[in-house]
Amino acid sequence: MTRRFCFTAITLCIALPAGVATGSVTIVDNLPGSWIDISGTGTALNLGDDDDVDIATTVGNALLPAGTVRVGSNGGARFLGIGTHLFAWNHSIPSAFAFDGDQALLPFWDDIDTDGGVDGNIFWEEIDGTLVIQWEGVEFWVGPLTTPATFQIQVPSSGPAFAQFLYNDIEGARPNGGGSATIGYQNGTGTANDVEWSFDTASAVGNGTVLSLRCDPCDTDCDVGADAFDIDPFLGLLFSGDAPCDFCAGDTDDSGAVDAFDVFPFLECLFGPGPPSGGQDTFRVFFDTSGNAGSDSAPHPGSGTLEHVKIETS
């Protein structure tokens, strides 16, 4: 069965191949976030060098489940899986050196050593439906003791992101904004994909940086995957401003509104750049606000009114 959806006034017809695409998440630095200091209220983990410990949380969301979370002193936390150790030597992700390749948040994977809570510490706490894990004033195995780092993970039960990495003090000579660190999300057995923000990149993050792990804005039904099931919610957003879920809004070009400019990025989420693959020959786009047919190579309209939609099934 092939489903087509067509716009008139601006007309767009696409044959949808069968099947469901894999899930997709991304890391962005343009969503707001607020530092939640738990250094005076959270539970201190007092981890030794290259140490790890399990915590039990009641907070989770569609990507990161509640339950047992394993915190590694070296700047990360495992969610799904059974991997027990985050090694001191960071690698590009995915990596078996990060909790045996299992699902993990890695806000700053580096050779951190708090020496049992003597040289900084790691805290965790649940606050108003958000799990916070904070590396506070932590030192490193190699480097001057006068340039510690302070950063945290926030995992909300709902909101515009699955997780956020916030950086309070990360620009010292040793942390160097990520000069010898890996920053990203490792999917493991999760339902999405790996996302690496940086690997051994100086100034990849700075004081005040907020990184947000969010689902693809094309994932308008919030099932952690951009696929054919997102078309109907996307049309609802485009024509009537519907809001089908909290995490994704259909604003594929990050303009602040769902409009005609989001159509091409949305199609590229489903099919990649250019026409659909697999021998499909029904990718036709016509831009015509006066009732005349356009060509397959018509340029972006720039403006126009989307007034009608026709959905066909064959």
Image (cartoon, rainbow, N blue to C red):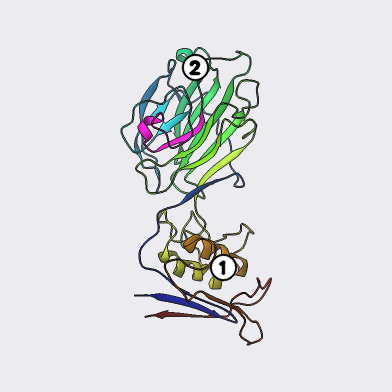
Residue 78 marker: none
Point out residue 63 in the picture as x, y percentages from the top left corner: 40, 46
| Whether residue 214 is situated above or below residue 51 in the rendered picture | below
Please provide the residue range marked out in magenta. 93-109
The residue where tag 1 is placed is 263
Residue projecting furthest to the bottom: 291
Point out residue 299 in the picture as x, y percentages from the top left corner: 66, 72
Q: Amino acid at mark 2?
A: Asp
Q: Nearer the viewer, residue 17 or 56?
A: 17
SS under mark 1: helix
Residue 4 falls in image quadrant: bottom left
Q: In the rendered view of the protein, which quadrant contains the C terminus? A: bottom left
Q: Nearer the viewer, residue 55 or 188?
A: 188
Identify which residue is drawn at 54% across, 72% down.
240
Instruction: Judge the density around disc 1: few (<14), some (14-19), many (≥20) Cα neighbours within 10 Å.
Output: some
The residue where tag 2 is placed is 113
Q: Is residue 98 magenta?
A: yes
Point out residue 159 in the picture as x, y percentages from the top left corner: 49, 49
Identify which residue is drawn at 40% across, 54% down.
22
Q: Is residue 213 magenta?
A: no
| Whether residue 60 is situated above or below residue 291 in the rendered picture | above
Of the two numbered discs 2 and 1 on the same chain, state the one appearing first in sequence: 2
Q: Amino acid at mark 1?
A: Val
Count of labels in the image: 2
Point out residue 82 in the picture as x, y percentages from the top left corner: 30, 33
Identify which residue is drawn at 54% across, 37% down.
165
| Whether residue 29 is situated above or below residue 273 in the rendered picture | above
User: Which label sits in the foreground, 2 or 1?
Assistant: 1
Residue at mark 2 to residue at mark 1: CA–CA distance: 48 Å
SS under mark 2: loop
